[in-house]
């Protein structure tokens, strides 16, 4: 068994890792960390959930522990596609560098320019940024990138989805060509391949899962469903979803339920709540505070079922989700991989279940082609739960769901849902929706930003 102590990391970092409780490095950490410590470029092809964030933060902290930052010249740069992800990366730095004096700043929308200017003016070791905000600062003459020794691009495939590749190229060109580059992407689209060929120098290529493959510790299945009448499809699917949840019994500790449309996310969450499930919706039309509170509730365990649009599928690190339900077959096959990647993270086991109607056949085939396996099919009839068993399960669900009944506040939110439903009826959630999907996470307060510059 490989140990963190074999990785020749600074003992202060090893102590921090021990405090976090990690037992052994994940495969990507095992391969990427030694190469990064030697100063090599790394091209990591890995999804979230593989431990990729620590595979770049740990060697960076080690390498930056020596030396001092100069005013307005960050020594390293981490580019993330969204504020939410940037904030998660910042949290990782905070966690692993707690025994060292490293200064960090976060350049993301929602934090005032003034505070960030002050931090950067003093000089930072690590600058974590979204591309647009970084270029804003640069253009205002507040920042020089010529001191960047290490540059990280995280979730490059998502940057591509969001149209950030020209920004990334521009930023690469503003940093010294002698910099070390650590580059991560879940998939290697042609445009990303081109970028890495241009800007990485003889990188170590670390691929921890097959391209666009689903993690092997996720048990997948698909329920083939034909509605009795076309106009009853929604109602019957929601009933089926409840059955599928109940059928898992106590194995289903918590779940993310994905719908293709925002309107269905709302309807599905409301319907689950009505039937006593502890559920809430999250998608791009809900205001930032509401989304972050919902997500936090889910992380902390006070919310059991998160009904989501694809926005929640990428980048978010929610540990130990036992189940993912695809209420709809995603129209984009890669979204399936991202959706089910919310479960079975960091070596845990997970279950991913999907409902497929005859209309979804083409999309289902595309998914199976992409992941190169045939997803086991369940016939509708095999889901008949024994009546006695059902009563017992429902009793348990009711017991667990002390907050199952919609509160007055929920109702207020529901009214807002209905309004947004009226304007967004049938609006599909597309990849472009990821752009700026998450506003500033609520834990990024002024004091958090201050804390980052220890
Ligand atoms: P990431 O792929 O960076 O999003 O990490 C996914 C999850 O794995 C996060 O919750 C990390 O805290 C966790 N993690 C990272 N490295 C390890 C490790 N060596 N052992 C156990 N969990 C880890």
Image: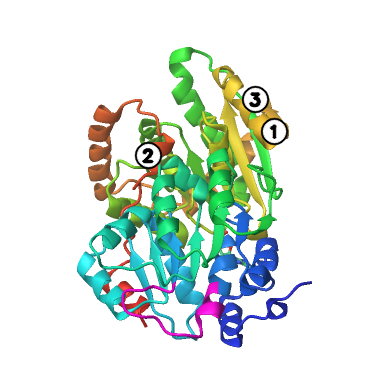
Q: Is residue 303 left or right of residue 109?
A: right
* Occupied quadrant, residue 146: bottom left
Instruction: Report the residue at 58% width, 36% height from top.
Output: 244
Q: Secondary structure at mark 1?
A: loop
Instruction: Report the residue at 24% width, 75% height from top.
Output: 118
Q: Gap in Å between the C-alphas at discs 2 and 3?
A: 25 Å
Where 201 falls versus 276 (above or below)?
Answer: below
Q: Gap in Å between the C-alphas at discs 1 and 3?
A: 10 Å
- The residue under label 3 is 365
Can see residue 275?
no
Going by the picture, which residue comes out furthest to the top?
229
Going by the picture, which residue comes out furthest to the left?
114
In terms of sequence position, does the residue under pointer 1 or pointer 3 come before the other?
3
Q: Secondary structure at mark 2?
A: helix
Magenta-highlighted residues = 60-75
> Disc 2 or disc 1, which is closer to the eye?
2
- The residue under label 2 is 433
User: Where on the image, by quarter, is ligand 1?
Assistant: bottom right
């Amino acid at each position: 068994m490989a140990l963190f102590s074999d990785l020749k990391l600074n003992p202060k970092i090893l102590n921090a890792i021990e405090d976090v409780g990690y037992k052994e490095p994940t495969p990507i950490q095992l391969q990427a960390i030694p190469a990064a410590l030697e100063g090599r470029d790394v091209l990591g092809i890995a999804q979230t959930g593989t431990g990729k964030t620590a595979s770049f933060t740990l060697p960076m902290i080690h390498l930056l522990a020596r030396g001092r930052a100069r005013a307005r010249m960050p020594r390293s740069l981490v580019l993330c596609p969204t504020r939410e992800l940037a904030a998660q990366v910042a949290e990782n730095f905070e966690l692993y560098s707690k025994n060292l004096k490293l200064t960090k700043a976060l350049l993301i929308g929602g934090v005032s320019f003034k505070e960030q200017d002050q931090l950067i003016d003093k000089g930072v070791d690590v600058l974590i940024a979204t591309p647009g905000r970084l270029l804003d600062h640069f253009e205002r003459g507040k920042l020089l990138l010529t001191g960047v020794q290490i540059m990280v691009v995280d979730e490059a495939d998502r940057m591509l989805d969001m149209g950030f590749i020209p920004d990334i190229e521009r930023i690469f060109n503003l940093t010294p060509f002698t910099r070390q580059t650590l580059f991560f992407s879940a998939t290697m689209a042609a445009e990303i391949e081109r970028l890495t060929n241009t800007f990485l120098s003889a990188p170590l290529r670390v691929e921890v899962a097959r391209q666009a493959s689903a993690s092997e510790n996720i048990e997948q299945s698909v329920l083939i469903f034909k509605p009795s009448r076309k106009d009853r499809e929604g109602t019957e699917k929601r009933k089926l979803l409840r059955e599928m949840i109940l059928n898992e019994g106590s194995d289903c500790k918590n779940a993310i339920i994905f719908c293709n449309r925002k309107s269905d996310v709302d309807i599905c969450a409301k319907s689950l709540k009505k039937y006593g499930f502890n559920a809430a919706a999250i998608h791009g039309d809900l205001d930032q505070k509401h989304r972050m509170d919902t997500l936090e509730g889910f992380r902390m365990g006070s919310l059991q079922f998160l009904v989501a649009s694809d926005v929640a599928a990428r980048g978010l690190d929610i540990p130990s989700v036992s189940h993912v339900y695809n209420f709809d077959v995603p129209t984009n096959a890669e979204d399936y991989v991202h959706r089910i990647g919310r479960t079975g993270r960091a070596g845990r086991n997970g279950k991913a279940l999907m409902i497929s109607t005859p209309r979804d056949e083409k999309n289902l085939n595309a998914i199976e082609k992409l992941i190169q396996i045939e997803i086991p099919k369940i016939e509708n009839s095999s889901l008949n739960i024994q009546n006695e068993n059902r009563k017992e399960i429902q009793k348990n669900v009711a017991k667990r769901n002390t907050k199952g009944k919609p509160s007055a506040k929920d109702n207020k939110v529901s009214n807002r849902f209905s309004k947004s439903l009226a304007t967004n009826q049938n609006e599909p959630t597309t990849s472009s929706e990821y752009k700026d999907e998450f506003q500033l996470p609520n834990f990024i307060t002024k004091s958090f930003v201050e804390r980052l510059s220890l």
